[in-house]
Amino acid sequence: MSILFDFLNSTGFVSMTTGNVIMILVGIVFIFLAIKKDYEPLLLVPIGMGAIVGNIPTVPGMALSVYDDGSVLQYLYFGVSHGLYPPLIFLGIGAMTDFSTMLSNPKLVLLGAAAQVGVFLTFLGALALDFTIQEAGAIGIIGGADGPTSIFLSSKLAPHLLGSIAIAAYSYMALVPVIQPPIMKLLTSRDERLIRMKPPRKVSSREKMIFPVAAFLICTMIAPGAIVLLGMLFFGNLLKESLVTERLANTARTAMIDIVTVLLGFCVGASTQAETFITKQSLQIFGLGALAFAVATAGGVLFAKFMNLFLTEKINPLVGAAGVSAVPDSARVVQMVGQQEDPHNFLLMHAMAPNVAGVIGSAVAAGVLWAVLAPPVEAIDPSDAAPVTTLIDSTSTEPQDMRIAEPAYKAPLVRLN
Amino acid sequence: MTLASAVDFSQVFAGKGMAIAATGMIIVFVALLLITMFISALPHLLEMISRILPEVADHHAPKDASRSLLPDEAILAAIGFVLHTEMQREVGTEETA
């Protein structure tokens, strides 16, 4: 009889909390929105299902959740917590990205830079809400509107906020068609929205081959922290544009990115356990995330208007909103808003230029924040290493000293005072 | 707890927050500005390089997408047919009016 009671006590019904129920409902809502409303289904279905899986109460002593040592979910979550999956996704993104619109009108690249103001203003906003400087950096990158970049940086700077940041980033990326249009219309006049831009020029294959290597060298020499993300992005693009590695490019942009997306989404969802997710900090992060997207959109649009003061061939300011690197949703939003004013004004290909530039810009911003805010790794002094005796010469029966350096790295979170 | 009490701007100005934000923004701008300048110069650089290493048709290169798969006469015939159909429709509309 006691065995029966022990079994009953180990069931999820006994340990289920209100927070678990809420998070399971959130997961179901995500799945509903993905299937019924077609809101980013490739992300919301894995995340939603992961949230349901992660919020089933586990049995004490059994390694079941992402936070239990030795559990299967923890092994899968390794790619999230150690920043492995985002660079692989960037490899796939690079293999499917066409930079020719950016190459044909290079001044639009600056709109992608301007939109990154959302990252740094949100960083300041997070500091004002009493987050630590590392946490603020991880929250600020939500303004880059890039899911993999957000996950990568938060895994480095604030792993305990990874779930909230990832959910906020992907949720707002799905809401780009809702968030951006009012801001775009508020900041532009009708005459500005009617501006037609010259068709982009044809870009040669040589330009497309040289660009990824040169752009990687330029960006990473300035911001070495972006080596991982930009290296994979431009490597994937080179696979595509070189024309001699089509098989690899095809794999990167199809099977590989799909596998990683499934694992990433599912593990991020599974990490959103109620006790770590339903906190005041999560609510603040969601609020800051909305602010980040709004500021990034406004930054791109306003910078386009500023550039028009000096240009003879005007830029349609709506295109600036595509500097938010939610590819290709924000470019589609620009097309939609532009066509509401003039159905014959096709802005999509123009908007793709700042859109892909924004991916580069957000990766550079993440590299800068990581380089500046990551806790320093303490140098290991070999003379401090503890001696260990072990047999290393198979022919000798005498034990020989072999010094092994003990890691002295400790990563405290630095509170800004 | 109101929003005003939750926000503390002294944290923003006290430490290195403003400096990091400003520096980060400048670095992003400089990086993308250099990329912009490189992209602007790239066609001219390639023109100079092509004088030494002319670009030859590579068997890996995709076929020119602007070349039509149809003969020009077939395209002209199709355009003529569409115009004729539209004109017939307009004439028919005017007669009924």
Image: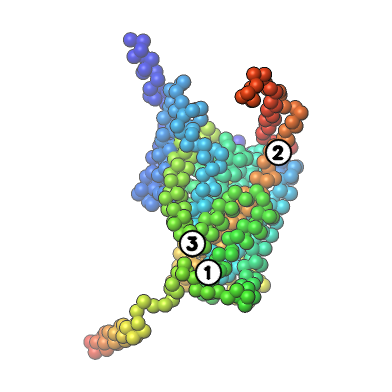
Question: What residue is shown with label 3?
Answer: A244
Give the amino acid type for the residue marked by disc 3 in the picture.
Answer: Val
**Mark closest to the chain's N terminus, 2 or 1:** 1
Q: Nearer the viewer, residue A270 or B66?
A: B66
Q: Is residue A298 visible?
A: no
Q: Nearer the viewer, residue B58 or A239?
A: B58
The residue sitting at 75% across, 32% down in the picture is A381
- Left or right for A119, reference A239: right
**Alpha-carbon span between mark 3 and mark 2:** 41 Å
How is the model colour-coded? Answer: rainbow
Question: What residue is shown with label 1?
Answer: A205
Q: Secondary structure at mark 1?
A: helix
**Chain under disc 1:** A
User: Can you say which quadrant of the picture contains the N terminus of chain A?
Assistant: top left
Give the amino acid type for the residue marked by disc 2 in the picture.
Answer: Pro
* Residue A326 image point, x, y percent: 51, 55
- In the drawing, what numbered circle is on residue A376? 2
- Labels 2 and 1 in the same subunit: yes
The residue sitting at 52% across, 40% down in the picture is A80
**Residues packed near mark 2 inside 10 Å, few (<14), some (14 to 19) or many (20 plus):** few
The residue sitting at 33% across, 86% down in the picture is B73
Name the mark nearer the viewer: 2 or 1.
1
User: Can you say which quadrant of the picture contains the C terminus of chain A?
Assistant: top right
